[in-house]
Amino acid sequence: MKKLILLISLLLAGSKITTEPIKPNMETVRDIIKTCIKDEATIKRYENVINLYSSNYGIDPLILAKRIRTESRFNPFARGDYDGTNYQSYGPLQIKTKYFAHLLYQVDGGELGKYLKAREKSGLPINHARYMARIGYGVECGCIIISNYLAKYQGCYIRAIAAYGYGMNHEIFKKINQDPGYALNTNNKSAFFIRESLY
């Protein structure tokens, strides 16, 4: 019933929807992490990192935690987007390698990014998995992207998460961008990826 009410209210709100975070339940960040992780030290580590960077980048911490769960099940060693030769995404928020050095240039005082850009320029290999497996780096890099999308889409979490998950050139994102209610319609199975990050 709560999901039906949420869907109806969002559809009625039209283009103004989701400038506020979607929180139809009483879950905490810790509750979300514990659905995947049992080790108390790891739970605490993720909890601290999520609370820190969600605050720093103006992201709802519950949505950030659910995004990590969707992307990697809180596995810092997760890899994805295999192209037949290499994996293209790494870490808790599955950062794509093509954005890797640029994002790390914005964290840690820029020193790591400078080092990696120098390696790229010299044609030297970069161990993407090694850096993205560091929970702090992996989460902060994802937060940079999400916060940029939130700014671009005037605080609309549905559009921001869809852009993060699919990319702005994907047909599903284009449908969601035109009508955010599309993502919340449970008949659209392709958008489940977005819904599970929102409620």
Image (cartoon, helix red, strand yellow):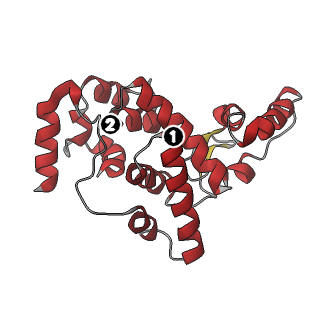
Q: Considering depth in this image, is 198 or 150 the residue closer to the camera?
A: 150
Q: Which residue corresponds to the image point at 69% horizontal and 31% vertical from the top-left?
A: 102
Residue 176 in sight here: yes
In the rendered image, residue 73, in percent from the top left (x then y), is placed at 49, 60
Q: Which residue corresponds to the image point at 78% horizontal and 47% vertical from the top-left?
A: 127
Q: Which residue corresponds to the image point at 46% horizontal and 36% vertical from the top-left?
A: 164
* Residue type of the residue flagged with mark 1: Tyr
Mark 1 or mark 2: which comes first in sequence? 1
The quadrant of the picture occupied by the N terminus is bottom left
Q: Which residue is mark 1?
A: 57
Q: Is residue 8 left or right of residue 168?
A: left
In the rendered image, residue 30, in percent from the top left (x then y), is placed at 43, 67
Viewer-nearest of labels 1 and 2?
1
Q: Which residue is mark 2?
A: 158
Q: Which residue corresponds to the image point at 50% horizontal and 55% vertical from the top-left?
A: 51
Which label is found at residue 82? none
Say what secondary structure mark 2 lies in.
helix
Residue 81 in sight here: no
Position above or below: 145 against 40: above
* Residue type of the residue flagged with mark 2: Ile
In the rendered image, residue 77, in percent from the top left (x then y), is placed at 64, 58
Label 2 neighbour load within 10 Å: few <14, some 14-19, many 20+: many
Q: Is residue 74 left or right of residue 138?
A: left
